[in-house]
Image (tube, rainbow, N blue to C red):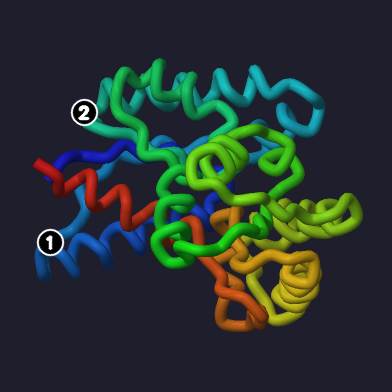
């Protein structure tokens, strides 16, 4: 089993989810009492969020690049960023680590295409920072041929408030899910044939979510891809 280096803390509930998912998948593949070999560098989300909110993505990238170098020094053999938004800096992080990077959008896009081989339009829910970046377009549109249906401006404001507020503090609730359910319904009404939960914390709302089209949890799909790479020869 390879050791995976995880850039976490963005925010901490996401890191908690990944640690559980990775270990569950390792045990599913190898049996108990196996557990995942991993090294975690956990960032201070307040600092990263301030960098992004104040228009300094290069500073947020620098923090993740430093984390990547720490992971390499600690013995990681591959690296993963435990946040969709953080993948705006995926190439820089991979270069800083000098290691293969398991990309959340690329792996999610492949999994969605496998599940929906004839679909043309795909909805994506995420932070405004992630939706403005180009990595979703590269992975979903250029990589797998989907036309993306994205939340409208007011919906993005609502998602940001929810993600950076309650969900970043570990507070998943039916009330929060009602907001996401409404926005997912809006994407479906505009033609989305499937919807990606393109923020790792959104997956925690699934017990309450209702959607007229299939939902795809990017964190779960990413974790499965990470484990495949950990166990590959």
Side of 17 relative to 164 (left or right)? left
Q: Position of residue 147 (x, y in %)?
A: 65, 50
Looking at the rendered structure, which numbered label has been put on residue 75?
2
Residue tagged by mark 1? 34
Q: Picture quarter containing residue 77? A: top left
Q: Position of residue 92 (x, y in %)?
A: 48, 19
Which secondary structure, mark 1? Answer: loop
Residue under the image location 49 percent in, 46 percent down: 144
Q: Picture quarter containing residue 190? A: bottom right
Side of 232 relative to 63 (left or right)? left
CA–CA distance in space, label 2 to label 1: 19 Å
Give the camera-side residue of 105 and 37: 105
Residue under the image location 27 percent in, 67 percent down: 24
56 up-or-down from 177: above or below: above
* First in residue order: circle 2 vs circle 1: 1
Looking at the rendered structure, which numbered label has been put on residue 202?
none
177 up-or-down from 105: above or below: below
Instruction: Answer yes or no: is residue 82 visible.
Output: no
Instruction: Answer yes or no: is residue 134 visible.
Output: yes
Give the camera-side residue of 67 and 22: 22
Quadrant position of the C terminus in the picture:
top left
Q: Position of residue 142 (x, y in %)?
A: 55, 37
Which secondary structure, mark 2? Answer: loop
């Amino acid at each position: 089993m390879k050791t995976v280096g995880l850039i976490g803390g963005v925010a901490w509930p996401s890191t908690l989810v990944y640690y559980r998912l990775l270990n569950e998948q390792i045990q599913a593949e190898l049996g108990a009492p196996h557990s995942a070999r991993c090294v975690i560098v956990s960032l201070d989300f307040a600092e990263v969020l301030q960098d992004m909110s104040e228009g300094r993505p290069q500073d947020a990238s620098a923090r993740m690049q430093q984390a990547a170098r720490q992971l390499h020094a600690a013995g990681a053999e591959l690296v993963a960023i435990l946040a969709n938004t953080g993948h705006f800096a995926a190439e820089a992080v991979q270069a800083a680590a000098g290691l293969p990077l398991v990309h959340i959008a690329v792996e999610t896009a492949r999994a969605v295409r496998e599940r929906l081989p004839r679909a043309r339009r795909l909805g994506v829910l995420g932070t405004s920072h992630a939706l403005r970046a180009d990595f979703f377009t590269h992975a979903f549109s250029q990589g797998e041929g989907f036309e993306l249906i994205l939340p409208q401006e007011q919906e993005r404001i609502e998602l940001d408030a929810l993600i950076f507020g309650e969900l970043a503090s570990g507070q998943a609730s039916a009330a929060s899910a009602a907001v996401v359910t409404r926005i997912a319904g809006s994407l479906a009404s505009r033609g989305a044939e499937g919807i990606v939960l393109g923020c790792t914390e959104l997956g925690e709302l699934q017990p309450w979510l209702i959607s007229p089209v299939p939902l795809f949890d990017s964190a779960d799909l990413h974790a499965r891809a990470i484990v495949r790479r950990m166990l590959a020869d």
